[in-house]
Amino acid sequence: MNLFEIENIWIFLVILPIVSFMYTAVGHGGASGYLAMMTLFGFVPETMKPTALLLNLFVAAISFIHYSRAGHFNKKLFITFAIASIPLAFLGGMITIDPSLYKKILAVLLVFAVLKMLNVFGKETSEIKTIKIWQGLTVGGAIGFFSGLIGIGGGIILSPVMLLMKWGRIKEIAAVSALFIWVNSAAGMGGQLSKGITIDPQAFILVGIAVAGGFLGAYLGSKKLNNKGLRYMLAFVLVTACIKLFFT
């Protein structure tokens, strides 16, 4: 991957920290957004998966630290999902699928990101339900596998499920999702490396830029942030990427 041979790369580098900012503001690493951006700017599929996982490792860590320090992390809830997700994310990371199928699966998963950014999944409720072990294992394992397979952390899927099932409060969900993303990204990256996939050194340029936006987003999101305008803009980018993925 030669970043500076990609057409309009400077526009990508300007938008990248904005995407990172918006995702960390709601407790996510942003891999679905990074993959959407890479799709729009013509990155080759072979570099998209490891690059997105690498970005997730850094950005999700920042997000988790801020939410955890603010007292929103529920360790027991996290472990319920992580037990099955970590090994299955590693397994998913080891699997290489046809580029055409990869794009279609990614497009479907981006729909979750769009709905999340548009707050379709509802608002926080005072009625919190206790998750059963089998529910956590099933949901965590399924999301973990697809996380490793596609190169996302899975938080963009986990948090809507948790919200709909009333398994936690908004910021608690964000904290759990952030660490869930990190461990799945690490496991998925481990699966990639075990298959001989290497990380392009230029990917660390993207890491530095994404971290800048992610730090600010996580700080404000862990306190209080509600910027509908940026959410709608990001949703538009994700929808555009979905369309391109389905028809290319």
Image (cartoon, rainbow, N blue to C red):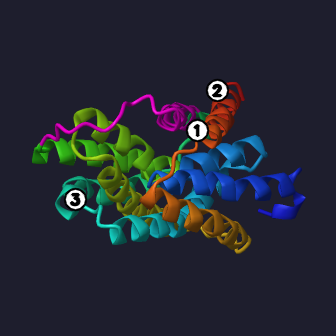
- The residue at 31%/43% (across/down) is 142
Q: Nearer the viewer, mark 3 or mark 1?
A: 1
Whether residue 153 sits left or right of residue 242 in the image: it is left
In the image, residue 117 lies at what x, y percent?
Answer: 52, 38
User: Which residues lie in the magenta part?
Assistant: 104-129
Mark 2 or mark 3, earlier in chain: 3
Q: Does the magenta stretch include residue 121?
A: yes
State the quadrant of the N terminus: bottom right
Q: Kindly give the residue lying farthest to the front in the view shown.
A: 224
Is residue 6 visible in the rendered image? The answer is no
The disc label shown at residue 85, or none: none
Asked whether disc 3 touches disc 1, contact meaning CB atoms under 8 Å apart, the reply is no
Q: Nearer the viewer, residue 31 or 23?
A: 23
Q: For the residues carrying marks 1 and 2, which lies nearer the camera in this image?
A: 1
Residue to which mark 3 is pinned: 83
Residue under numbered circle 2: 246
Residue 228 image label? 1
Type of amino acid at the residue the image marks with label 3: Ile
